[in-house]
Amino acid sequence: MELFPSLFCRLCAEGPVFGSCFCRFCEEKMRHALPRPRWERIEELSVFSLIAWGRDNETPCRALLYDLKESQDLRLFRFWSREWVRRLPPDTFHNAVLVPVPSSTGRLHSFLLARCLAETTGLEMVEALALGKEERQPGKSRRERMKRRLRLKEGVDLLSYKSVLLIDDVTTSGATLLGCKKALRGSQKVAALTVFRREPSA
């Protein structure tokens, strides 16, 4: 966690702000722009994203995503976790377990999102997945390579939960999320929550 969180809004740089990471104006503006709850299908996986990232909002989305990846200010992660809870029906979280998507860069953004959502909902968070070393696989698409890299950690058993919620910051093609779903190998329901859903053309 940042020892001295910024007192200025992370979006407009105005301030000061207390107890939040955005000024009141930016927070209300952003909430107004967020979509109503809507699940999208990526092959066999249901994904709910707070922000649809397209050409019309490229600049603010890029800035928000950079801040999310580079920051360890827990206020930022708590804001997004609260928005998931505000915009999804309560049964989404019934007897579910939160599983952060492992990062290939070593950043903690997915872990911190899952941790803050666990604090907000009282659900358990389990770091169930690991990312193996990438190998050269000529002729294989990125989606196929990701499915082969992700694996369930030894000794992890999630079958006692009704559902698994994968937590990540952004998805584009869904390759990583689909790889996670395949690695879980369970019979229970698997869905994913992300902050951003980036359109391939964006």
Image (cartoon, helix red, strand yellow):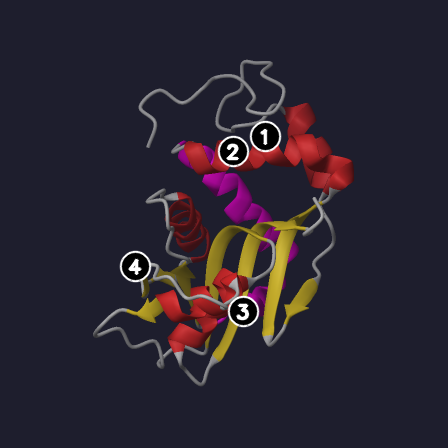
Q: Which amino acid type is marked by label 1?
A: Ala
Can residue 82 be seen here? The reply is yes
Which residue in the protein does label 1 denote?
63
Q: Are marks 1 and 2 in contact (CB under 8 Å)?
A: yes
Residue 198 at x, y percent in the picture? 65, 49
Nearer-N-terminus badge (3/4): 4
Residue at 61% across, 34% down:
62
Q: Nearer the viewer, mark 3 or mark 1?
A: 1
Considering only order in the chain, which callout, 3 or 2, is on the residue closer to the N terminus?
2
Q: Alpha carbon of mark 1 to alpha carbon of mark 2: how far? A: 5 Å
- The residue tagged 3 is 191
Asked if residue 64 is among those painted magenta in the image, a careful observer would answer no
**Marks 1, 4: nearer the viewer:** 4
Gap between marks 4 and 2 measured at Cα: 25 Å
Q: Which mark is first along the chain, 4 or 1? A: 1
Write down the residue under mark 4: 133
Circle 4: element type = loop
Indicate the secondary structure of the residue bearing disc 1.
Answer: helix
The amino acid marked with disc number 2 is: Tyr
